[in-house]
Image: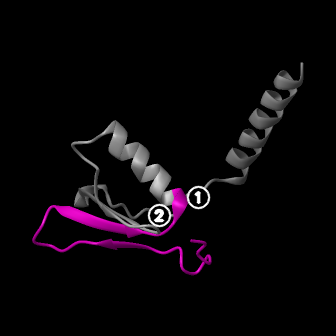
Amino acid sequence: MKLSRYEQETIVNYNAGEQTATLYTRDKAVMRKLDTLAADFPDTYKLTGQDEVSKTYSLPKAYVSYRRPRKISDEQRLQAKNRMREINLANKS
């Protein structure tokens, strides 16, 4: 079944009284990432349910993360640009 981009939702649910979070998703990219994590770390990530368009996973609440946006200076940006240019030139050789 083909879902629109709007319908490809991901919902994370947890509360203060439990140590686990539940993640429900209809996004195939998120499913692939979590399927890989569940295969590599079966004690941590668990597939708890699925149907034809969605999957539900269980994971430690501590693994849900909120991060600040990364800030880099113009000098750092220029250094990264130059590194990528060197890598591209080396790969063409």
Is residue 8 shown above or below 76?
below
Query: Is 6 covered by the magenta stretch?
Result: yes
Quick one: which residue is furthest to the left in this view? 17
Q: Which quarter of the rendered picture does the N terminus lie within? A: bottom right
Quick one: which residue is furthest to the right in this view? 93
Picture disc at residue 31: none
Residue 57 percent location from the top left of the image:
31, 60
Direction from residue 23 to residue 89 in the image, left or right = right
Asked if the residues shown at circle 1 and circle 2 are in contact, with their CB atoms under 8 angstroms apart, the answer is yes
Q: Disc 1 marks which amino acid?
A: Lys
Q: Which residue is mark 1?
A: 71
Is residue 39 shown above or below 20?
above
* 13 or 72, nearer to the observer: 13
Q: Which residues are magenta?
A: 1-29
* 16 or 10, nearer to the observer: 10
Direction from residue 34 to residue 41 in the image, left or right = left
Residue 34 percent location from the top left of the image:
41, 52
Q: Which residue is mark 2?
A: 68
Q: Disc 2 marks which amino acid?
A: Arg
